[in-house]
Amino acid sequence: MLFNSVSFAIFLPIVFFLYWFVTNKNLKIQNALLLFASYFFYACWDWRFMFLLMFSTLLDFFTGLKMQDAQNLKEKKIWFWLSIIINLGFLGVFKYFNFFAASFAEAASSLGWEVSVVVIKVVLPVGISFYTFHGLSYVIDIYNQRIKAERNFVDYAVFVSFFPLLVAGPIERATHLLPQIKKERVFNYTKAVDGMRQILWGLFKKIIIADNCAEIANYIFNNSENLHGSTLVLGALFFAFQIYGDFSGYSDIALGTARLFGIELLKNFSFPYFSRDIAEFWRRWHISLSSWFKDYLYIPLGGSKGGNWMRIKNTFIIFIVSGFWHGANWTFIIWGFLNALFIMPSILLKTNRNNLNIVAMGKWLPSGKELLQMMLTFSLTVFAWIFFRAENVTHAFSYIAGIFSTSLFTVPDFSGFSGGLKAIAVAGFFVFVFLIIEWMGREEQYAIAKIGNGWSRIFRWSFYAFIVFCIGMFMQTEESPFIYFQF
Amino acid sequence: MRKFIGNSFLFAVFTVIVYLLLIAAYGVMPKKMYKNINYATGAYGHMFSRMSEVKQTKDVDILFLGSSHSYRGFNPQYFSGYKTFNLGSSAQTPIQTNLLLKRYLHQLNPKTIVYEVYPISLSIDGVESSSDIIANDKNDFLSAEMATKINHITTYNTLLYGFYRDMFSLNKSFMEPKKIGFDTYVPGGYVERTVSFYKPKNNSLQRAYHIQANQLKAFEENMVLIKRSGIQLILVQAPVPSTVYNSYSNNDYYDSLMNSFSVPYYNFNKLLALNDSLHFYDSSHLNQIGVKIFNEKLLEKLQ
């Protein structure tokens, strides 16, 4: 069940109604409803993998309790490592086994040894990287005595599998979400309206920006060997907006949906394409993952305490691991490596925390310097996205070689593109409008949070209705899943 | 909570009104500005003339149904002695045929139906043909039923715009020329194309028809509807160039599917030995020389 599907449009009001009108008198029943709805939501993809989700939930719930009740540190460590090994083991088997097997075979082959490797033919369980990280943060927090183990299984299971965040995040923390699940929720009109508004904006980002850009980016990346360098640049640009619209759109819908149920999720995006350096970009892009790696990998590795060498080493580690988290492909590892490389100057010069505020705060336009900084940061990000999008490393390098050729200075050629120039004009126009709206709303939680606040209701509603109209009139007609579902 | 539900409902109503107003504005906007509307009165293949004529036609001997192979493939001049009408339309799928049957079968009251069953028509979504019918025929509950069966945003938007145009009779003054480009409309629904010849290409691509479940269901409904009316029914697969026909790997499966309906079925790709460059004008349609051969053979079968 996709957020941008008719089935979700039916599912959500039903759960909302049952939640606030039928089960609202009893928190336990209300949470049980959320759990049932979340498992139903997940089972709509593949009910068989629901058992994996249940097993992972049970594992972390019981190991959490065992750690809490452990009589000594040794016993606590045993339960801790049991949970870590099994969690990462599942992730390793489902997500990385084939990659390691193939990489091993290739390495052996390059040394002249022919090795036949076993390959697992199984689809990646949707959301496995996300709910595994939920569980991991929970057991690590218990181990480090940041939180106490949860003794109510339903509450814990809702924390892991709450349907808005189940398949693509944000990656929540027990310290943030569990207290909300355990506390009685009271319906708040302002927050519910805000939630609806954020869902609408998320749908716009996904359906209009991401899907329309995807049509063009897919064509260009799939035919890159025959296209001019100038066209390839456009392909990378369209992909940059595709992935931003897709993933931040998903996050907006998730946050808005959760808000309808009186629950606040962690913010995942904060206008990353208006960043002035790469460090700022990573404070604004997939925030819940970046902060997860910071708290559970970077700091335990020593963070920046050991001087420059330690900072450099740990920065490379978290970026490469973060890349690998996205998928079992060398392209993601190189993407992570590149980002580490791009962030290095600010790490070495200790300027990585220079841009903590919002760009051009309180102003209409950025200064010339800020504009240049944003353009440079965006260019580096787009360059790295080429690796993220490419089928394999060879494809990425040939794509880049295609860009840096004499054909870079020719007119982009779309003669083989079935969507025609109209599709490019539509996508380009909406990206332009989108950037203006995002810029205007960059000081808020999401771009349209405050747009129209001072307007009369009819104008405000007309603005939202116009967004609905744009969705109906310019959506892609093929259903397209969210990119991050594959991770 | 009451305020939230109430305002959500009001906003939904408001949005529908704004949506409808903006759809109505399609009529005064450049046609290509709206992506998910496809409303063209007088669409390709003289659909407007055909749908205007059918409203004045009653009690025919033979009714032809199907895709462009139907309205470009059954020339009434070769069926002299019979009163015929051709309700074919471009890329017509069983879902549109179902609508046309429900709308016109009783009035046309045919003795025989020749249903042209192009395999592709069961393998596509039917959006193109639904837009054709919405823009060139009246719109009613059956149109809405067709739209829900297709379940495509373009069909929904086009239908909403169609309702709006019908409401204000905006197509009343539309006149479709009898001759458009190479095509001439012949009363009775046929479209005659100036003779030209296909230049066959080497077609080494192997492909297969992928029958859509909703189209097959609609086709089965059509079979039941026609059989229940006691009308003689003949299923016909019109010929296509042999290079095109042979590029499909599951022709035998399709024949067995059509034969399973217990009505006469003729696959003219097998019954006729046509020449790709002599008897066709493109990769799908017969030219007038091919039509003559095809129709004479069909007439033999009918008699």
Image: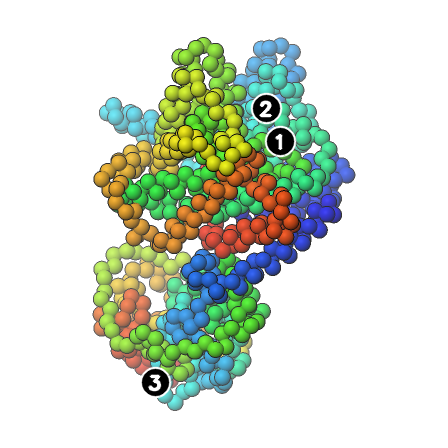
Provide the residue designation for mark 1: A159
Q: Quadrant of residue B35?
A: bottom left
Provide the residue designation for mark 2: A138
- What color scheme is it? rainbow
Q: Nearer the viewer, residue A207 or A138?
A: A207
Callouts 1 and 3 in the same chain: no
Chain holding disc 1:
A
Identify whether B238 is placed above or below A265.
below
Q: Secondary structure at mark 1?
A: helix
Disc marking residue A253: none
Residue under the point 27% across and 71% down: B281
Residue B164 visible in this rendered orientation of the protein = yes
Q: Nearer the viewer, residue B272 or B204?
A: B204
Q: Secondary structure at mark 2?
A: helix
Q: Secondary structure at mark 3?
A: helix
Q: Nearer the viewer, residue B180 or A98?
A: B180
Look at the numbered discs 1 and 3 and tell me whether their residues touch, using CB distance below 8 Å.
Answer: no
